[in-house]
Image (cartoon, grey):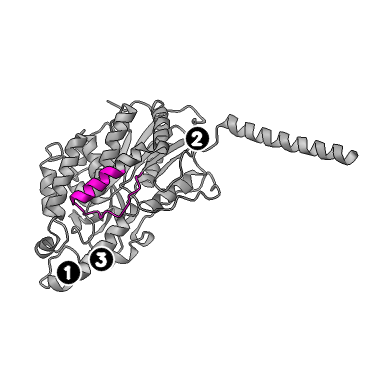
Amino acid sequence: MYYDIITGIIGIIILVFFYMKTKSVDSNQQQPLLINETSTTTSFGPKEFKKKKPTILIVTMDGGGMRGIITIGILQKLKELLGTDITNDCHMMCGTSTGGLLSIARAIDLEYSYLRDFYIRLGANIFGNPLENLFNHGTLANQVELKKELEQIQLLTGKNLSQFVQNKKLFVVACGKEIDSNSGFESVLIKNYGTEHQQMSVVQSLLATSAAPCYFPSVKIGTQKFIDGGAINNNPTFLAYIEAKELYPLKDYNYVIVSLGTGGIDSKAPSLPKKPKTNSTPKPPKSLGDSSLGTINNVIDNVGNASNNISDSSNDILKIGNDVMKGIANSHKQHCHFMNYISGNNDGVQYYRFNPELKKSIKLQDTSKEALKAMDEAVDNFMKDQKVKEMIIDLKKSLSKVSPTPA
């Protein structure tokens, strides 16, 4: 009998313990908001911010060449469903390569229909004749045509970054190094604030962030040369988070982060490890040695100088170009890296990742009608998904807490 009584008491104690533990979690609102943990779509963070502080909206856009059309489609659909445009409402916006172009374009409020038409025309002009480009320029794409197209956008021309859109923090991600240095390329944020790149023109910054090795020559500005930021950080979300912590310390602000991808294929869902220490320092890739493209440092300096024996090297350049673009296209690992970090540091961060699953691979330079159709279908199917709809409802609630941006 005593055994039964003791066993019953122990059982009651265990039940009370688990009840109090659950109650404690609820009261502190620490449970993560994981609506979906698929390969492409994730919502993560506290359902309600623990502390009432001003809330900053951060929008980031991945690189992906012509697949920027996917980002345009997502943004357009989000605007319709949210009743507001996150690219207008944000305090910080950034992008890598094609994402850099789109972040700058949206900062001057270029319409989505215009941007889609611009991408289709631009893609045909710069990617349409790879062998001709290789013969004339030593690269697979035409940077001269890209520069010409960018300079035709009146709001971009004749402006340095210091003169460009001052009601929000903007940056594009490139990889840079000193021309005379033997060191490798490192990730560089080219900003419209601070002092480091204030005299760089807006068009120069866009050429720098999109100078994919083998497709475009490196961009030389002053004593530095730049290549596509996607060689190290194709997904700039982690960089934006670190930058925001400098400008808007987490002790004083909450963050809503919206990350936009350009489509993925068969990516594994991110695994969330044990929570790291709260004061651990985030470390996104900094140099080519840390990225998937660490072996191409020696190749980059030799690309973009039209060779007299171009026919002999064309196959090598094509192969390297394909390898480079595959590496640049890999944003999922960086998404997982960021998820892993904020899983233990998420009290003041709500994170939303939108990245449609592609049924088959679409090359970053693919301008075909089939590719355009596939991208449109990917966006349509993605936005109809119930998990995505639920995530957008939660995002709308989060946006209601975002502080107004300066006029």
Q: Residue at x 31, y 54 (%)?
A: 360
Q: How far apart are marks 3 and 2 (CA)?
A: 43 Å
Residue pictured at 86% horizontal, 37% vertical:
5
Label 3 vs 1, first from the N-terminus: 1
| Residue 256 in the image: above or below residue 141 | above
Q: Kindly check if marks 3 and 2 are in contact, taking CB atoms under 8 A apart as contact.
A: no
Q: Which amino acid does label 1 sit on?
A: Ser
Query: Which residue is label 1 attached to?
Result: 314
Magenta range is 355-378
Estimate the x, y position of residue 263 in percent, counting from the top left.
32, 48
Magenta span includes 361: yes
Q: Is residue 332 left or right of residue 33?
A: left
Query: Which amino acid type corresponds to the residue marked 2 in the rendered image?
Result: Pro
Q: Quadrant of residue 295?
A: bottom left
Q: Please rate how many residues cluster around mark 1, counting C-alpha atoms within 10 Å: few if below 14, some from 14 to 19, many from 20.
A: some
- Which residue is found at the position 43% from the left and 51% from the top? 283
